[in-house]
Image: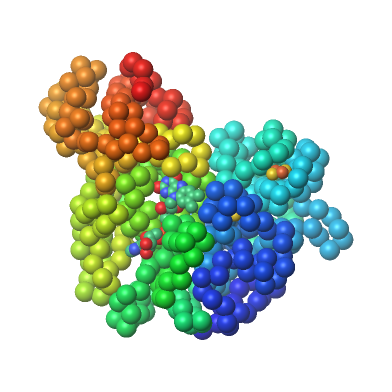
């Protein structure tokens, strides 16, 4: 298919000649004058640009998902159904329950944020899993900023509609809105965007264009376009290849597709790998989690990417794939330098494999950031210990983000735990080793001293949280709420 084709507000639209780096937000506003969708930050932080896209959920059935249209490149909607705020009011003038609730709760003043908030509430309306639990409402709305109304009325609106699941035209239309094939070969204005839908077709593209850049959710890459005005000559999306999105149990453990989005990972991991699910909970906002992928997070190779410490602590390996076949590396060896990975040209990250934790394993993750939701880590940590029959530590995997140029294990600290009883005295003995493992940097998020202190306190918090039994015994609260010994700073 060499034409961009998608369904917008109930009508199929074809666009043969669109620059592939046009964002959905700019397309809606500039080309179609659908100015209900607002631009605030153009970097995924404010939610003013939120629209809904029908995507297949973990059960394969389509569901409405709120996403940031400022980060969605137009080829990423190939074969999909998109709804903007303009579609919500019915032909007879009746407003959608999310709009009604916002109006009745007095949830809007200047109104700039309102369409984005309404679209976030639109998703919430059809979420059977939301159960109006406080943290789920926080999670649903944390990607939407409002400068003037104050969040209480918006929260009231959310409480009214979230999970109400009306049997209306949007619910009934979902089966027809199921995403279709994303296959695409778009070439316009000197730019190319290919979306293969099979691995074989991907290798064919790479043989002819080894310089191609990969993209999946675009939540990292699109910022180069919206903030630095980059115009990549050739992007190859991995989003259309179904096997890369799978989340599976295997005999030895778990296999996580690099193309799986963080919101799916969070739900799937809750009962299987709770420490990973906890990190996913504090990852970005719902709109970001619906687009950001496991592979994108690891291949971006940021020292403060949140999934790496969680997965390293779980003993994860990466499966790298190319036409030549597959090779495996421990995840910690995948990061070879600041923002550098072991990927070779024409090679992708295909899967992450995680061994099944044993019954005497304790694993927890922490994220310390200036605010709880939608923030970048100052320090992130993933910890795992396995205890022997006598209560001694027989395995220790302690991984940190934000403490070095790459996500990294604290190998000397781990060694100090091995063979020791799982006790406060053992932790006290191991904590000084962190200074041998890391020389953290000072930046605007935290000084070197702060980072060193936080890392030590997180390790102590890990012991506190797991000393009574398998993890976690505390509510999944913000990492900064973990009990610490002595003042931080
Ligand atoms: C507002 C906002 C909040 C965010 N919050 C967080 C957060 O809390 N924690 C956090 O860790 N990150 C956060 N991020 C960063 C980002 O969302 C994540 O890193 C996300 O997982 C990236 O996935 P993606 O599919 O969108 O990557 P993309 O942008 O599509 O790709 C990122 C890079 O990885 C490469 N790539 C992607 N997949 C593969 C693959 N399978 N094989 C080879 N190369 C590949 C691409 O070529 C590109 O260079 C945030 C971003 C934004 C904009
Ligand atoms: S414009 Fe702010 S999130 Fe898109
Ligand atoms: S009502 Fe003004 S920004 Fe929210």
Report the front residue among 133 and 458.
458
Query: Can you give x and y, in whole percent of width and height, for residue 275 in the image?
Result: 36, 38
Toward which corner of the image does residue 84 lie, by quadrant?
A: bottom right
Query: Can you give x and y, in whole percent of width and height, for residue 218 in the image?
Result: 46, 61
| Residue 362 in sight here | yes
The residue at 38%/29% (across/down) is 472
Ligand 3 image position (quadrant): top right
Report the front residue among 40 and 118.
40
Q: Residue farthest to the right? A: 92
Quadrant where the C terminus lies? top left
Q: Is residue 460 left or right of residue 395?
A: right
Q: How is the image coloured?
A: rainbow
Q: Is residue 281 left or right of residue 355?
A: right
Query: Can you give x and y, in whole percent of width and height, for residue 90 in the image?
Result: 81, 60
The residue at 26%/46% (across/down) is 405
Q: Is residue 138 left or right of residue 90?
A: left
Q: Is residue 102 left or right of residue 41?
A: right
Query: Can you give x and y, in whole percent of width and height, for residue 338 in the image?
Result: 27, 52
Number of numbered discs: 0
Report the front residue among 276 and 174.
276
The residue at 68%/58% (across/down) is 37
Toward which corner of the image does residue 346 lie, by quadrant?
A: bottom left
| Residue 357 in sight here | no
The residue at 80%/43% (across/down) is 103
């Amino acid at each position: 298919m060499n034409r961009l084709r998608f369904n917008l507000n109930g009508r199929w639209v074809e666009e043969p000649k669109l620059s592939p780096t046009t964002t959905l937000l700019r397309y809606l506003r500039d080309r179609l004058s659908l100015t209900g969708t607002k631009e605030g930050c153009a970097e995924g932080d404010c939610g003013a640009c939120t629209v809904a896209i029908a995507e297949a959920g973990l059960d394969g059935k389509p569901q409405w998902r709120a996403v940031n249209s400022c980060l969605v490149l137009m080829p990423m909607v190939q074969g999909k159904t998109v709804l903007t705020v303009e579609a919500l009011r019915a032909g007879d003038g009746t407003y959608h329950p999310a709009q009604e609730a916002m109006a009745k709760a007095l949830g809007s003043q200047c109104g700039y944020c309102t369409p984005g908030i309404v679209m976030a509430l639109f998703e919430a309306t059809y979420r059977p899993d939301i159960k109006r639990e406080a943290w789920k409402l926080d999670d649903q709305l944390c990607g939407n900023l409002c400068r003037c109304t104050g969040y209480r009325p918006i929260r009231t609106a959310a409480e009214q509609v979230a999970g109400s699941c009306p049997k209306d035209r949007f619910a009934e239309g979902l089966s027809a809105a199921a995403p279709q094939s994303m296959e695409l070969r778009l070439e316009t204005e000197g730019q190319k965007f290919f979306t293969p839908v099979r691995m074989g077709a991907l290798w064919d593209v790479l043989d002819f264009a080894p310089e191609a850049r990969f993209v999946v959710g675009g939540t990292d890459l699109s910022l180069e376009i919206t903030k630095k005005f980059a115009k990549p000559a050739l992007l190859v999306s991995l989003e259309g290849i179904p096997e890369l999105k799978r989340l599976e149990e295997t005999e030895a453990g778990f296999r996580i597709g690099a193309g799986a989005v963080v919101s799916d990972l969070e739900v799937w991991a809750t009962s299987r790998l709770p420490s990973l699910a906890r990190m996913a909970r504090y990852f970005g906002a719902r709109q970001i989690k619906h687009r950001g992928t496991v592979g994108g997070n690891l291949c971006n190779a940021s020292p403060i990417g949140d999934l790496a410490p969680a997965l390293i602590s779980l003993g994860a390996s990466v499966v790298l794939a190319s036409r030549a076949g597959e090779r495996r590396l421990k995840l910690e060896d995948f990061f070879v330098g600041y923002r550098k990975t072991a990927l070779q040209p024409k090679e992708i990250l295909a899967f992450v494999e995680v061994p099944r934790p044993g019954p005497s394993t304790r694993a927890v993750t922490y994220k310390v950031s200036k605010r709880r939701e939608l923030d970048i880590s100052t320090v992130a940590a993933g910890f795992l210990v396995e205890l022997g029959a006598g209560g001694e530590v027989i395995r220790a995997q302690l991984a940190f983000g934000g403490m070095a140029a790459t996500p990294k294990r604290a190998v000397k600290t781990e060694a100090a735990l091995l063979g020791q009883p799982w006790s406060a005295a053992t932790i006290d003995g191991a904590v000084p080793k962190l200074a041998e493992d890391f020389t953290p940097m000072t930046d605007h998020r935290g000084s070197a001293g702060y980072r060193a202190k936080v890392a030590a306190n997180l390790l102590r918090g890990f012991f506190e949280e797991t000393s009574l039994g398998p993890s976690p015994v505390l509510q999944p609260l913000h990492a900064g709420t973990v009990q610490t010994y002595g003042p931080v700073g």
